[in-house]
Image (cartoon, coloured by chain):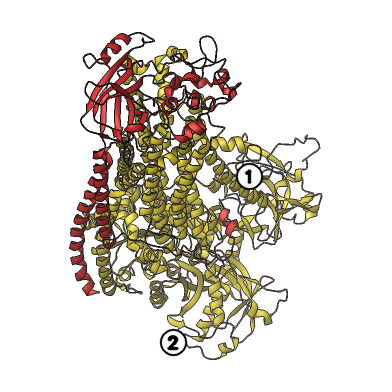
Chain colours: A yellow, B red
Amino acid sequence: MQRVPSFPPASECAGEEKRVGTRTVFVGNHPVSETEAYIAQKFCDNRIVSSKYTLWNFLPKNLFEQFRRIANFYFLIIFLVQVTVDTPTSPVTSGLPLFFVITVTAIKQGYEDWLRHRADNEVNKSTVYIIENARRVRKESEKIKVGDVVEVQADETFPCDLILLSSCTIDGTCYVTTASLDGESNCKTHYAVRDTIELCTAESIDTLRAAIECEQPQPDLYKSLGPENLLLKGATLKNTRKIYGVAVYTGMETKMALNYQGKSQKRSAVEKSINAFLIVYLFILLTKAAVCTTLKYVWQSTPYNDEPWYNQKTQKERETLKVLKMFTDFLSFMVLFNFIIPVSMYVTVEMQKFLGSFFISWDKDFYDEEINEGALVNTSDLNEELGQVDYVFTDKTGTLTENSMEFIECCIDGHKYKGVTQEADGLSQTDGPLPYFDKADKNREELFLRALCLCHTVEIKTNDAVDGVTESAELTYMSSSPDEIALVKGAKRYGFTFVGMRNGHMRVENQRKEIEEYELLHTLNFDSVRRRMSVVVKTQSGDILLFCKGADSAVFPRVQNHEIELTKVHVERNAMDGYRTLCVAFKEIAPDDYERINRQLIEAKMALQDREEKMEKVFDEIETNMNLIGATAVEDKLQDQAAETIEALHAAGLKVWVLTGDKMETAKSTCYACRLFQTSTELLELTTKTIQESERKEDRLHELLIEYRKKLLHEFPKSTRSLRKAWTEHQEYGLIIDGSTLSLILNSSQDSGSNNYKSIFLQICMKCTAVLCCRMAPLQKAQIVRMVKNLKGSPITLSIGDGANDVSMILESHVGIGIKGKEGRQAARNSDYSVPKFKHLKKLLLAHGHLYYVRIAHLVQYFFYKNLCFILPQFLYQFFCGFSQQPLYDAAYLTMYNICFTSLPILAYSLLEQHINIDTLTSDPRLYMKISGNAMLQLGPFLYWTFLAAFEGTVFFFGTYFLFQTSSLEENAKVYGNWTFGTIVFTVLVFTVTLKLALDTRFWTWINHFVIWGSLAFYVFFSFFWGGIIWPFLKQQRMYFVFAQMLSSVSTWLAIVLLIFISLFPEILLIVLKNVRRRSARRNLSCKKASDSLSTRPSVRPLLLRTFSDESNIL
Amino acid sequence: MTWSATARGAHQPDNTAFTQQRLPAWQPLLSASIALPLFFCAGLAFIGLGLGLYYSSNGIKELEYDYTGDPGTGNCSVCAAAGQGRAPPPRCSCAWYFSLPELFQGPVYLYYELTNFYQNNRRYGVSRDDAQLSGLQSSLRHPVNECYPYQYSAAGLPIAPCGAIANSLFNDSFSLWHQRLPGGPYVEVPLDRTGIAWWTDYHVKFRNPPLVNGSLALAFQGTAPPPNWHRPVYELSPDPNNTGFINQDFVVWMRTAALPTFRKLYARIRQGNYSAGLPRGTYRVNITYNYPVRSFGGHKLIIFSSISWMGGKNPFLGIAYLVVGSLCILMGFVMLVVYIRYQDQNDEDEDDE
């Protein structure tokens, strides 16, 4: 940044040497000096646009987008061919369905875009305050211009990227959380530009005449988070009353907007299968057309076949080039057979997904009374993917656990304090003796509790303005970390209550209800590297004390050694029980020392360059030689039924990975508690601890990887196929890895070795039942997901998380599930589905996912089946009509077949079918394995359906063909023509495909009955109607009375019944056989299950000592 | 996409059977105990039907004669040879003699059959104007373009009826003579040329244009007959109710056949002594041989056939029913074996439960 004219360039926004790509911003849009001409630069306004369309461009743009889909484009081409070339069927037959599809999709997308517009407007129209001519002016957010001075108040988000000019605090700092940007929810300190710190009123800020020179907008979030006076749009102001900032980047140029990637289009495995089938069918179509064209010209090589006297060509036809004729013939055949690729399938699939997803949001099992919300479906494209999941990646805090911390116990000098029965507000109780198991020294005890009361960044929010001791019971604690609140509340339980800050003094009410005041000298904030925080306070008596609390590994090395042992035992036991532990230490600082410390701290704080590093160094120096007082244990309660859910997922053959930012011990114990690891699970560890022992990390890592792989390969010599079975019988393995080791594996060195590590690591991962990754950065979580996603066989991944730090993995995985947790809605908003609790995952996957998959897979197969049935007779007919592209069916039938006659039954089926009861699905997770790996859309089932269709199509055609080998079908000797032939085939076809669906339906609700029988009735009714009237708009009255005449023949009736029966006969046979087998199989299964559940019910609290004992000497 | 957020809001989901996917449902399981009796019943029923169909098909008599006139196949070969390569072929007639040792059970129908004639060719099939055939004045004067090259005559007059189908109307004619006693006179057997087309066709779909001064000929004034026709459409039959567009021969021809080998009904024999069938004796069919078929490798046949409740002679249905019926029963037995096997296993399991 550079202030003109009086200041030397400070180059905070732009490097001195990089002047080219910079922009100059005039603060308050005042010209800096009269001499310099004020050139109004063009910057974009502060509107955020996430919507795709406007009213004007919707139609062309949407159409363009839609026709970019291969299927739609194909149909468009077919339609255009029909319009231009002389084709057997009218353009209406393919135009109408296409029009329908395009319209429905356009309406849906238009509606979605309208919602986006509304969301944009919400942001763009939100009120902000801008300082104009020394007055606060209220404005809409979108009106902010670059150079405007904006006032932001506490807990508001910044409306654009701002340079912090001044804040209401004296030292010009403000606290900001960037949770929505990078997922880090802790407060970060930003500093105002030093020269403007004092300008903290509207009037004074308006007098500022300055220009800022900074870089052109660029998206690199991480690089640019550095500048300590740049406040990013989307971040939230915390703990600071208000700030003034000048807008430098607005609207779509803000870091957030540049980083915003529209949700990537996730495509489900089923959709990919559809495309594969499409290609197969396209190939069939082209083959058919090519075969027909070739045969046509072979057949026509006989002159009398080409042009018999009764069927003369027109002059034009004779003169057309043969090549051109062949080409148009080819196109005509394609048009004739194009129904083999059903337009309506896309509509039906879309409708199925759209309507089907309602069942998720409607499910009252997903309803959570606490938050008064049920499940939410953000995308309906992935319903079936829920039934295909191979890997589940779950966050720990807030997902497996409740993220509501509760103070459980503490230990003071090795004495355990636990279980105050009375609740915290019973202050009277504290006078009486607490049920200590045995007491520590009274002074130490009080010191410990004072430490808890002082060493934190908790703020107090009083419900009303009255600030007094009497209200202490009503105090609400606010903090970025729920642990701290738990600790403060814990201290309160033992009689020490933090009652707030006044004039920089922390006030604590002690057990005797006296107020003690401590002057807060310094706060050494928590950071994830040090993993501890400290405060320096001055007591009333003038002593200067430092209190420090932090992770055991961060505190133990900094205290006198002899104190550790007693506490350590407690800490370890607590960690094993799954509690989050913190150690508390203190030290007295001599006044002389304090002088030095104080100077160092202020120096570091004021440093312009490398401030972070300098402060870290100072902190490090201060926090040494402390005395350990004790430790605390805070419980992060497991979510309801988390363990059962994980067990069910395991039983369903899913691999569950826990990815957490938490430390290993806690995460591990949580994993035990939720039965991710069983007692029998052998843990393989790849952590900093196991690796740091040796000199060269990489060598050690390599050794370990090789060793583990050997172990696992020895255990599972076979391919992955037998793996599932192996799990139930063999030793189970679990893997623990932490963030730093992971990055070592992933990016160790760019030579061939790293690649090798990665593949070994993946081999190990794939053989483990459960994997725990701790100390993960948000980006690393996504990295892991991506790694697994790209494994051989591209397994389907699902991520579930609740916090902003899970967003990256939610977006990365195939299916992202957000938990509507305490850490805001960031995850839920970015997810594909969101549920209130982790336990809902069970039903979501096992029941909903399974059903959706079965439904849509059946839908897809059925659609291709019924259209092959439909078109095959038409193809066969070409052999009997001189390859003249004569359609077998009337145009109305061609059009209506997919739209009216056969569409509703399959739609109803695909919405309502429950081939297995929902209850059975949830209670028997093993059923989930049956459909894993896209089982119903593999080559086998596809071939089965295709052959079935081919068989039926052949039966339809040749059945009718042989039926027609007679003089007459009627008892009055009258003769039928070609349209009757087609109608018989068509009638058999409609009945067969509908009844085939009826055979497949296992769950007959009244809706199924209605649409199946209704469709058939409608077909009959329509045929009568269509044939009953001379339609004036038709050129040829082909169908006039054909249907009625057809039904007047007994032979036709008998033939129709027979052909339907023959077509369905194999299917019926198969079903009966299957049922006979299934019944006995199920009976066997249920017996086995009963005995299973008796023998191997895993215990809830596994014994952990074995795994922890070898670890305790590592510390 | 956030539709569900707004659609559902933060309300508690409705607890209805539909939303909870708990609609009462019939969950049929096609178990062996249901399927087996079904198989046997269906099998028996099919076999019964098949037998009925088979015997009634066998009971139908057919008598056919190929009069294409391939060299050395009878006296029609003369006509065939005469017509060779000449268009229009000269008028020629020939005859077919046959004798019936016993009564040909009636009612008897006379069909003609053409082979290798592609009435279902698309170019051929669209070459007609249904509006014209329904008697619409405007269409009579302006036939649709599909009729081309049989849309307008060389003189520029609209062709009525236009199109290739009409132009290629089958114009052989037959008359049947019966010699009761050897050496006796031949008596003409009356052929009923009406009632051979669909009732709805010649009453609704095909209509003559409105008469002009009570004359059909005047109604057709200003049109030309199709080039291959020897006489205009209003002279197809002397019977005023069977001429013009509603001539039943014509209507029958206009219902295009499904397959390249097809039969069309020519006449019904149901009058006088012949209502019960054709009595024994010698018969002669006089054939006016006009229609050239050899040029496209076709054949023409004349067929006498009786008819049963199931239509003409066609053993296919009967045989198919018999086969499927037996298959059903066979499968029933197979199923029974499988079922009993599994049943044994299940019994043991059931004892445990």
User: Where residue B161 sits in the image (x, y, percent)?
Assistant: 50, 21
Considering the image in quadrants, where does the C terminus of chain B appear? bottom left
Give the chain letter at badge 1.
A
Residue A186 falls in image quadrant = bottom right
Residue A1003 visible at all: yes
In this view, B219 is above or below A662: above
In this view, A981 is above or below A618: above
Can you identify the residue that label 2 sits on? Answer: A437
Closest to the observer, A477 or A704: A477
Q: Residue at x 43, y 82 (%)?
A: A415
Extreme residue in the bottom direction? A432
Element on which disc 2 rests: loop
In this view, A373 is above or below A447: above
Residue A588 visible at all: no
* Badge 2 amino acid: Phe
Closest to the observer, A728 or A869: A869
Residue A1043 falls in image quadrant = top left
Closest to the observer, A402 or A619: A402
User: Where residue B119 sits in the image (x, y, percent)?
Assistant: 39, 25
Can you identify the residue that label 1 sits on? Answer: A49
User: Where residue B256 sits in the image (x, y, percent)?
Assistant: 41, 28
Q: Is residue A393 left or right of residue A366?
A: left
Structural crowding at the residue carrying mark 2, measured as other residues with C-alpha within 10 Å and reported as few (<14), some (14–19) or many (≥20): few
User: Where residue A534 sits in the image (x, y, percent)?
Assistant: 54, 68
Mark 2 and mark 1 on one chain? yes
In this view, B212 is above or below B328: above
